[in-house]
Image (cartoon, rainbow, N blue to C red):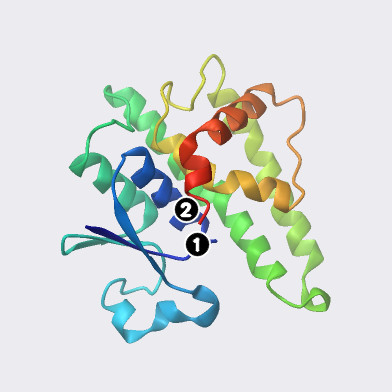
Amino acid sequence: MIKLYHFAPSTNSRKVRIVLIEKGLEFERIQIDLSKKEQKNPDYLKIHPFGQVPALDDEGFIVYDSTIISEYLEDEYPYPPLLPKDSEGRARARLMEDFRDNYFNPPFIEIIHEIRKPEGERDLKLIENAKAKITNCFDRIEKELEGKEYLAGSFSLADIAYMSNIDLLGRFNIPVDPKYKNVLAWIERLKARPSHAASAS
């Protein structure tokens, strides 16, 4: 059976959980508690040499990094497909997943690190700047969704990447301006997928 080494609150861990659920794959969840520094345990470092989550063990083959894991699962378990068939569509999906990984998700991680601190030690300016970075991303996402239900046309790994951040918008009080009609409708479509609720822990 597939083993997923993850930390439930981690956005990148949830991203892989969603892929596994969308693929209909059974998997064992193995919790690596980042708050207890379990990712630095010597035994876990044999699985993920950089001491991060998630990591996946598929019958002895170990792969890490959420995006690489998602691509591996798409290659190894191609049905149902989570990337378009055409090269242009696949490239578009990968570009939008890359945008999430490098621009949309990092500010969420900054906020998470701050709110874990005692209230008096939090850097409120850093939190506000992080929220602004997230909000700025909606311009790009809105344009990419023009005339489409999903980022690459059909539902794909690109959309899954953002699904793990959706609940945090409300939790961190980051509103989506009503002018982003495409984004708001897309978010509702993503929340309606069974994998969204099933991946929450």
Q: Amino acid at mark 1?
A: Ala
Q: Tell me the quarter of the image containing the N terminus.
A: bottom left
Q: CA distance from mark 1 to mark 2?
A: 7 Å
Q: Nearer the viewer, residue 95 or 119?
A: 119
**Residue picked out by circle 2:** 14
The single residue placed furthest to the right in the displayed view is: 120
Neighbourhood count class around disc 1 (C-alpha, 10 Å): few under 14, some 14–19, many 20 upward: many
Q: Residue 79 appears at what percent x and percent y?
A: 24, 32
Q: Amino acid at mark 2?
A: Arg
Q: Is residue 45 above or below residue 198?
A: below
| Marks 1 & 2, CB-CB < 8 Å contact | yes
Q: Residue 111 appears at what percent x and percent y?
A: 68, 61
Q: Where, by quadrant of the figure, is residue 176 drawn? A: top right
Q: Which mark is residue 8?
A: 1
Q: Residue 94 appears at what percent x and percent y?
A: 38, 37
Neighbourhood count class around disc 2 (C-alpha, 10 Å): few under 14, some 14–19, many 20 upward: many
Q: Assign a secondary structure to mark 1.
A: loop
The answer, for residue 162, to whether it is visible in the render is no
Q: Residue 40 appears at what percent x and percent y?
A: 41, 82
